Amino acid sequence: MIYAHRGASKLAPENTMSAFELAAAAGAEGIETDVQLTKDNVPVLIHDENLRRTTNGTGFVQDYTYAELSLLDAGSWFSPKFSDISIVSLDEFLKWFKHQPMFLNVELKTNVIEYKDIERIVYDSLKRNYVLDRTVISSFNSDSILRMKEINPSVKTAFLTSTNRRDLVAYAKSLRADALHVKHRLLDKKLVKDCQKSKLDLRIYTVNRPTMMKKCYKLGVDAIFSDVPYEALEYRQLYHK
Ligand code: G3P
Ligand code: MG
């Protein structure tokens, strides 16, 4: 399966409605997005804790209310033609997403800044919008994965990592995770086998180069995250075993 990473983030500013709509139009089966919390505890879709890179604001997401963040320009950094685009909340996004025949991966960005109750807040939003059955919640933060399963053991979770460790599969299992989301350079045949044996789904990020797409398809991973989902779809037709 192909998840559009932060939406179709090569064509439009990442984690904005434009990028999500382009992902759907391209035929991606899923969308991956990153969540942080505002000062008034609204989950918003933005990758960095700091506003500098992807908006015309400064400082940290957690120091502004959602109303304040909505006034920022979240598109001009990418191209002047996206200057009217703003940061979107998870709820606003889900109003659109719930009508799309797609899967969702919500990544909780709670490793640099640990947001209190982010798991409960995100869970409630997903439940309210009836998308839990097609959503996987991931995080680099192990505690966050554990807390999600405490809220509801049937929620699908994934442990995210870019670091190799010998006991990776066992570690993910110890967190009761349903999947492993790993950086592409960690992918090899043994990892695919070990995940299959342990009934863990294996998804790979961020797969933008044709050689890596080919490797993923040949090894038969469960999904990839790509900034270029339209290209990933074309290569899948060629190489999927
Ligand atoms: O969820 C996969 C991937 O998005 C993790 O890394 O930094 O792109 O959020 P990052
Ligand atoms: Mg992410």
Image (cartoon, helix red, strand yellow):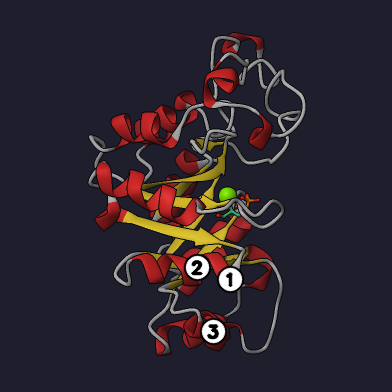
**Does residue 172 appear in the picture of this structure?**
yes
Please identify the quadrant where the N terminus is shown: bottom left
In the image: residue 96, left or right of residue 58: left
Mark 2 or mark 3: name the one nearer the start of the chain.
Answer: 2
Q: Could you tell me if the residues under marks 1 and 2 are in contact, i.e. CB atoms within 8 Å?
A: yes
Q: Which mark is residue 145?
A: 2
**Between marks 1 and 3 in the image, the one whose residue lies nearer the viewer:** 1
The residue that disc 1 covers is 142
Q: Mark 1 to mark 2: distance in Å? A: 5 Å
Residue 77 image point, x, y percent: 70, 20
Q: Give the mark toward the camera: 2 or 3.
A: 2
- Where does residue 20 sit, x and y in percent of width and height? 43, 32
Instruction: Tell me the element at label 3.
Output: helix
Mark 2 is on which residue type? Ile
Residue 123 position in % (x across, y down): 37, 53
Q: Residue at x 43, y 37 (%)?
A: 90
Q: Is residue 74 above or below residue 177?
A: above
For numbered disc 1, what is the local secondary structure? Answer: helix
Front residue of 100/68: it is: 68
Q: Is residue 218 visible?
A: no
Callout 3 amino acid: Val
Q: Quadrant of residue 186?
A: bottom right
Q: Where's residue 142, x and y in %?
A: 58, 71
Disc ID at residue 119 = none
Q: Residue at x 58, y 13 (%)?
A: 71
Asked if residue 53 is positioned above or below residue 158 in the image, the reply reads above
What amino acid does circle 1 point to?
Ser
Q: Quadrant of the C terminus?
A: bottom left
Say which residue label 3 marks.
Answer: 169
Q: Along the horizontal axis of the image, is 223 left or right of 112?
A: left
- What separation in Å lies between label 1 and label 3 (alpha carbons)? 13 Å
